[in-house]
Image (cartoon, grey):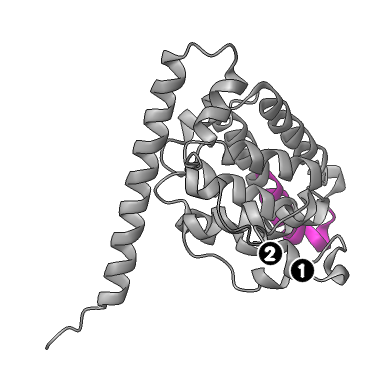
């Protein structure tokens, strides 16, 4: 039986692999450059790596015809009615499928911490895991933790835990955690403190287990115990003491 190959999918996979390799090489060179320059602080080191994709302006970019260019089409197109807390710009109705598409939307189209939070929840752990299967771009993990810490709510607790678990499975995760800034580490600690405080506190002592609801209560206790174990495991992975 003849098997048809999806050349479009192969081409897309190849492009993603090439882009990921170029990004890795670019950021690695920026790290060595920052070390050679003997930067004064981690924040300066981090800024150099984050800006590694930027190129200096050439002479023709500075002179010539002065054409009006909209550098932020996402912001220009967004409707004023979309400024509410729970909505995303119309341009993001089609969610990204690659890390480059994610980075583009994250930088250009999301103008508030609330929009970024909704964006992460809409993507969910499975999509985020696929998008960042190579690795999470330098600096993004810290931004994710800050956004989640600022916006996490009780109803989203399980979703946030699943997102954290998915990100912890990406390549070079340990290195990304080690390179978090002091402020990002503090946001990470606050996030897990909030998650711990959102536990239902279901008491599983025998005196509270009524005969007619024993099965339901035991299942609830087991579910809470599983969530608590997951939270403790994630705290270790994210180096939160």
Which stretch is magenta?
210-225
Q: Is residue 221 magenta?
A: yes
Q: Residue at x 81, y 61 (%)?
A: 213
State the quadrant of the N terminus: bottom left
Query: Which residue is nearer to you in this view: 51 or 180?
Result: 51
Cα distance between the residues tagged 2 and 1: 6 Å
- For the residues labelled 2 and 1, say whether their Cβ atoms are less than 8 Å apart: yes
What is the chief secondary structure element of the magenta stretch? helix
> For the point 86% across and 63% down, which residue is it?
83
Quadrant containing the C terminus is top right
In the rendered image, which residue does mark 2 sit on? 74
Spot the residue most to the front. Answer: 64
- Residue 78, which numbered label? 1
Q: Residues within 10 Å of mark 1 (few under 14, many from 20)?
A: some
Can you see residue 203?
Answer: no
Image x and y of residue 121, in percent: 68, 59
In the image, is 56 to the left or to the right of 220?
Answer: left
The extreme bottom residue here reads 1
Residue 30 versus residue 68: which sits nearer the camera? 68
Whether residue 37 is situated above or below residue 53 in the rendered picture? above
In percent of width and height, residue 28 lies at 38, 30
| SS type, badge 1 | loop
Q: Nearer the viewer, residue 68 or 73?
A: 68
């Amino acid at each position: 039986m003849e098997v048809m190959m999806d050349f479009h999918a192969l081409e897309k996979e190849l492009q993603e692999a090439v882009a990921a390799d170029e990004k890795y090489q670019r950021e690695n060179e920026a790290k060595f450059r920052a070390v050679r320059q003997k930067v004064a602080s981690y924040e300066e080191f981090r800024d150099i790596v984050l800006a590694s994709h930027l190129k200096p302006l050439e002479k023709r970019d500075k002179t010539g015809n002065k054409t009006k260019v909209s550098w932020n089409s996402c912001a220009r197109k967004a409707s004023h009615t979309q400024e509410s807390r729970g909505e995303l710009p119309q341009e993001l109705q089609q969610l990204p499928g690659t890390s480059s598409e994610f980075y583009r939307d994250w930088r250009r189209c999301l103008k508030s911490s609330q929009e970024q939070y909704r964006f992460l929840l809409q993507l969910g752990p499975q999509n985020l895991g696929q998008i960042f299967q190579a690795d999470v771009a330098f600096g993004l993990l810290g931004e994710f933790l800050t956004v989640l810490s600022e916006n996490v709510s009780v109803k989203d607790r399980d979703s946030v835990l699943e997102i954290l678990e998915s990100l912890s499975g990406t390549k070079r995760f340990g290195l990304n955690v080690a390179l978090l800034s002091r402020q990002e580490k503090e946001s990470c600690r606050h996030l897990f403190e909030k998650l711990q405080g959102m536990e239902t506190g279901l008491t599983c002592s025998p005196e509270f287990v009524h005969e007619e609801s024993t099965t339901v209560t035991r299942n609830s206790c087991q579910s809470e115990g599983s969530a608590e174990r997951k939270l403790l495991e994630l705290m270790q992975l994210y180096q939160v003491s």
